[in-house]
């Protein structure tokens, strides 16, 4: 890591203070905004005893905490360990992946509590937060983690934080349009989290494209142990995905059903991923990249429909298809995107989140359009799609249309937002060399680039 | 991994298509069978509102989902991360262990949902699945993961899948005989999961025995980091075992009690494992293999009795004994089994699952036989052993006898089933060299053997 | 590990039997004491059906198991995986850290069930245990794991077990004084777990100080992969800390609130840790030690106040401050403690547990003193601070005073207890060389020192 310095100390000093300043100032801003706006929801407030009486609840177990907290913790693990370790497969970015994921997620959840709070939990001037808000904040940050997968190794921590700020904001806007204006169902976020997050990230990485990045391919290699670390990420995402898709569904049957559908879809997805991975390799071997990623596509693709009556065999079919689509994407589409469209997709999020997210949106639209009172029961039908109030005359086919519109809106906002953020990052290029470009000798060095790698001077470098 | 090829392309092509074809065809079969048979249980169906009214439930929290989902997720982690990473201690099979465990478990849970569904959840032509079915499917696959531990490194993925198909089927038959015909209690599966799974696997590995396998011992070595990965598996199994043994117990006190008993047994087991590990080593050092495995024997051995009134000190005694038995087994029995009985038990499942499973069955029989209305209370007694309907006149000592019969039945089906599957695998030997034998030069090479290792041609091999 | 032997076989034999004997005799003692004292709580006993009727409970879901079991499992993971893996950053102690942590925790929870049981769950001659006792036992052992962090690499497993025995005992005494005599609130254990545990460990390590320990600094280095393993520990502690602080809070709003406050504090702490880590490093890089440890200080520091109406922005402020204090501590205080005060704090627990624990106690005292009926509601106020019975006239400011007294008591007992245990360990020094000192040639060798390292003679040593 030690190289001779060519740059003056003035810049050095400037750069050195950038990350600390951004972190501290933003955190101060969070404190002020939380102070002005954020309070406990009635179920987390000490007035709960009175609330309970008013709501005619006979037991503390009726507190939403007990319905959702176990799922929240599973989602929490997915965001911090799942996404963090999934990206450790690169031999030189294991630390960066986990550490920067940690940083952006910790910042993002605070900003998401505010943004989503203003849109969804705002009552008489205050945002009232409970466990469901924590889950939604984690979800929102999940979309940033996805986008991070596309630009892994190309940005500084400050650029990541800026991206997080913008993406969380746009996420909340997009979510508001989908859930409140279009009255769309998307409990597991096929559209709001995966489609939006992935196309946002892909747009950013397209704009940040530079040909000489290819020279540092050696850094993208993996080693045996980094692949085992990545499997930790994969397995936690895979195992807890039923919690992800069911975490904010309605109490009772909807949560139950969402977990079962996701479990089925993921199981089928593993089989077709292994099949196509073996089939498309020259010697019939299995490719760890596919196993680490494509096996998860089944969870993404039932994100919208898991809480609907997709049925177990319907879920198997979705998982079956997505394992194939995602694996084929890794083999044929990723190289094509890089060579022809100049989209350097470090972790292959196009195959894991973008395409399966789109499929998930479409499956959701079809499942909603196909809903009947016979299948759902009279009450279940109304409850499942929230056909009450202004929406009580909406029919399944109209709902299907709105679901489809949700996909389009998510795509548009992702492209526009990604372009905006990418351009901003691109303009800073003159000053900030990318982490990867840094090792290529023709790129001018500066101190900021050192901040990309975490290290401890007291510790020896990697073996 | 690159070696010169001696074989023709015809065979190559045939082999290359085997794994994909099996995976795809079987998954298609799953979709068809799920389509014909599998539907949601009333608690996961959109008709739940009506169901709730019929069952006089006042709150969604009464849905079985909230009683069992947290335990389900813990069990899920044990199957995929626990068993997967426990087997990463071999330095060259870390990938294979985690990856193939992933493949067989993902396939196995689907087949288990069907098999167990036909036996236990079949109503008017449909299998109705809920969270308890998911747990049971994970349990069933757990027995396959155990058997996998005996043959790790000796079989191709296809052989593993075939074994999974057979073993899951026999598991369901054995479970049906025990739980329904003998009316035996076995919530944590000492008999159905551990005894059955382990002796099944040991029978298979006995039949697959070949002397020249010993030549590739170098592959069975471990390295520092692979042992830390294995500790991840160990600890997750150890920590979540209370969830495993309580996951399908009756609501309320039974789940509560099963968790406490298991917690106590596991704690005691750690102490005696460490004691005997240190005592039996030449220089008093601790052996990582014992710590990784024998510490878990206490969980296996209270699998049947944990939900009974075993009491905390009873659990400590069981854990105390099992830590000793299991550690002594690793030191003296495993070498004996290999040299004299030609049983190559790669992960030592005889010490971790087979013997403790037998002890668990016996402890369960004794605990049941010793049950009194005084200890359980009148209602508790009937509820604990389900002494209702046709069984309302059964006495504790008779129940103890049936429990003991359950052990014998499990053993018989394990031996018979293992012999069948082993013979089948053995006959394919002419064509399929084993993964391990492959490195010995006298064994003819073929392409299939390459499928044992997952690799990515773009990635450098392990360091 | 193989060095020529200079010592006679007599001592060898004596040493070799020490660890096994201690483990076995203590476990036998546990069995006897459990047999005499420990029984199931009514909620885990088979008489639960009768209990339910007496308590007018209509559903099994009212069993405390369902309120606390998910949190218990999260806490369990923190103790065994969290603390265990957090200490794997040392390249030569990865095994020892995880393995000895496993050993001491497994023993400690049994002794804690007894000690805490005698003080808190003793009814007509029996200790009645349920899920809350399991959580409290894990908490108690958590304080030992913290102290272990200070002396990591300096003690034999037997010394660790002796320390565990003493520390658990003193923990229970201190906890009894605080919770029962002073009637103090400390759900997340800022005082009872962190302040007590850390100052206990620091006192022990001070007394065990020997200058030549510094010669073996090379052993304290880390490698790339050991830092990734340590991040597993960090992240599981960070993610599950909301469960830790809410695990034994009152049902309903208190658990809910404790989780939210902790979530907020931890998020803020990550930002200021990253800021100061980057600011205090010469080149603006991030230091993995800070990220692995200081990010957790926010959870420690709301341990007392999380269940109070600290509010989300209050939590952010606490996290903000603690990230700074902890990081600055690692940079300036740890070297000072070692060079001037001769306190060798291997894992830096002074920065992660001691200072944040003190802050947590103070924040708790202030939050309690500032409580008003307006903020809590009339019922909520009484419930939150348990102002019933003998305490119904206690005012918030008096409560604040008692909270502050709790800090002082915890400190005094920690210093006294640590001094006692340290002296005992120090006196054994003539016979037992420390694990680290062992490599320094001037220290006489003995066989016991070998027991510090776990190894398997069949396995090659670390690469």
Image: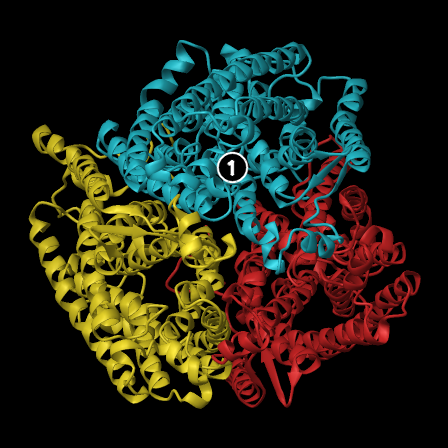
Chain colours: A cyan, B yellow, C red
- x, y (%) of residue B101? 32, 49
- Left or right: residue B190 versus residue C284 is left
- Left or right: residue B143 versus residue B379 is left
Q: Which residue is mark 1?
A: A83
Q: Nearer the viewer, residue B382 or C423?
A: B382
- x, y (%) of residue B266? 47, 72
Rendered view: C108 above or below C223: below
- x, y (%) of residue C438? 62, 66
- x, y (%) of residue B462? 39, 40
Rendered view: B307 above or below B216: below
Neighbour tally class for label 1: few under 14, some 14-19, many 20 plus, Cα within 10 Å: many
Rendered view: C455 above or below B462: below
Residue B273 visible to an observer of this rendering = yes
Q: Nearer the viewer, residue B378 or B113?
A: B378
- The structure residue drawn at horizontal position 12% and vertical position 67%, both measured from the top left corner, is B416
Residue A335: quarter of image: top left
Q: Nearer the viewer, residue C105 or B257?
A: B257
- The chain that hosts pointer 1 is A
| Mark 1: secondary structure | helix
Residue C185: quarter of image: bottom right
Q: Nearer the viewer, residue B22 or C157?
A: B22
């Amino acid at each position: 890591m030690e190289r001779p310095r060519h740059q003056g100390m003035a810049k050095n000093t400037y750069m050195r203070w950038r990350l600390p300043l951004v972190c501290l100032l933003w955190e101060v801003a969070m404190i002020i905004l939380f102070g002005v706006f954020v309070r406990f929801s009635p179920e987390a407030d000490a007035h709960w005893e009175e609330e309970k009486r008013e709501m005619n609840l006979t037991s503390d177990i009726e507190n939403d905490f007990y319905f959702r907290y176990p799922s929240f913790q599973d989602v929490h693990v997915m965001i911090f360990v799942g996404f963090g370790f999934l990206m450790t497969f690169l031999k030189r970015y294991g630390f960066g992946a986990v550490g920067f994921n940690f940083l952006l997620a910790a910042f993002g959840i605070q900003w998401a509590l505010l943004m989503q709070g203003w849109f969804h939990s705002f009552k008489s001037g205050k945002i009232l937060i409970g466990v469901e808000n924590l889950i939604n904040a984690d979800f929102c940050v999940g979309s940033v983690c996805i986008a991070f997968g596309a630009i892994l190794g190309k940005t500084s921590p400050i650029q990541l934080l800026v991206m997080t700020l913008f993406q969380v904001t746009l996420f909340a806007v997009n979510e508001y349009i989908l859930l409140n204006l279009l009255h769309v169902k998307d409990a597991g976020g096929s559209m709001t989290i995966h489609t939006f997050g992935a196309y946002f990230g892909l747009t950013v990485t397209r704009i940040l494209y530079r040909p000489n990045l290819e020279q540092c391919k050696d850094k993208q290699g993996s080693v045996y142990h980094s692949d085992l670390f990545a499997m930790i990420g994969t397995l936690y995402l895979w195992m807890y995905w039923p919690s992800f898709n069911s975490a904010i569904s309605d109490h009772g049957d909807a949560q139950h059903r969402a977990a079962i559908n996701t479990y089925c879809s993921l199981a089928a997805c593993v089989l077709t991923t292994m099949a196509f991975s073996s089939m498309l390799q020259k010697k019939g071997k299995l490719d760890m990249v596919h196993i680490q990623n494509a096996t998860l596509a089944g969870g993404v693709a039932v994100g919208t429909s898991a809480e609907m009556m997709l049925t177990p065999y319907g879920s198997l079919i979705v998982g079956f298809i997505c394992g194939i689509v995602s694996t084929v994407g890794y083999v044929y589409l990723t190289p094509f995107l890089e060579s022809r469209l100049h989209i350097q997709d470090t972790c292959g999020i196009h195959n894991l989140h973008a395409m399966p997210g789109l499929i998930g949106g479409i499956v959701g639209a079809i499942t909603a359009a196909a809903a009947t009172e016979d299948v759902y029961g009279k009450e279940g039908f109304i409850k499942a799609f929230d056909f009450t109030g202004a929406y009580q005359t909406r029919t399944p086919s109209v709902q299907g249309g709105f679901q489809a519109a949700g996909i389009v809106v998510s795509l548009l906002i992702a492209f526009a937002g990604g372009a905006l953020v990418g351009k901003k990052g691109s303009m800073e290029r003159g000053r900030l060399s990318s982490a990867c470009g840094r090792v290529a000798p023709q790129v001018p060095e500066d101190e900021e680039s050192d901040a990309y790698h975490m290290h401890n001077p007291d510790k020896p470098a990697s073996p």
